[in-house]
Image (tube, rainbow, N blue to C red):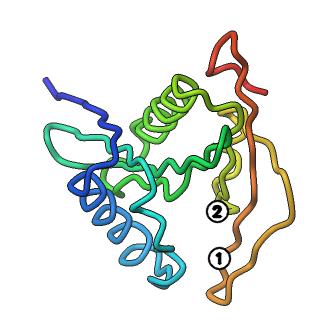
Amino acid sequence: MSVLKIEIGESAELCAIADELRKKVFIDEQGVPEDEAFDGLNGQSHHAVVFYDGAAVATARLLRTDNRWQIGLVAVVQSKRGQNLGEKIMGAAIDFIASNGGDEIFLTAQQQVCGFYKKLGFEQSGELTVFESGFVLVPMKRILHRNGAREPS
């Protein structure tokens, strides 16, 4: 039987594991330039990592600014896509944020995956950002309800 575990923390070890996953997905697989994939904020962030039978297979970064949190750099390795790991890591991240006093979550989604975030209760909240590389990011947000963190806004 397979074992699925999600860890969320600020350790340098967890950050390094998350960065390796992001490098595989964003830079190696999707061709995102390194300066667009890494912004220098990892040391100020919490990192969520999904381990499947001990191997790191998905990640998300959580960055707090007052009562607002940003979820970013969500990545699932190609071999594990379609197994609901994106939903699992986002659910864990939302629950973590709610349990740590967060009122609002914002993110910037790659344009082609906005539907995924809409299903999780996020709405577009601003203008698109188009990078020189051609990648398009959509700002989205979700207000957390105190009567249940997973209720869509």
Horizontal and vertical percent position of residue 115: 70, 45
For residue 126, which numbered disc appears in the image? none
Q: Looking at the picture, which amino acid does disc 2 mark?
A: Gln
Element class at badge 2 = strand
Label 1: how many residues lie within 10 Å, few (<14), some (14-19) or many (20+)?
some
Q: Looking at the picture, which amino acid does disc 1 mark?
A: Phe
Q: Residue furthest front?
A: 66
Residue at (44% x, 37% y) in the render: 89
Residue at (50% x, 47% y) in the render: 62
In the shown orientation, is residue 112 left or right of residue 138? left
Horizontal and vertical percent position of residue 6: 31, 34
3D distance between C-alphas at marks 1 and 2: 7 Å
Name the residue beneath numbered marker 1. 135
Name the residue beneath numbered marker 2. 110
Tell me the quadrant of the picture where the N terminus can be found: top left
Using the image as rendered, state which of residue 126 and residue 136 is in the foreground.
Answer: 126
Seen in the picture, residue 92 relative to 22 is either above or below; the reply is above
Horizontal and vertical percent position of residue 54: 14, 41
| 1 and 2 marks in contact (CB < 8 Å) | yes
Q: Residue furthest top?
A: 147
Residue at (86% x, 65% y) in the render: 127
Horizontal and vertical percent position of residue 88: 44, 32
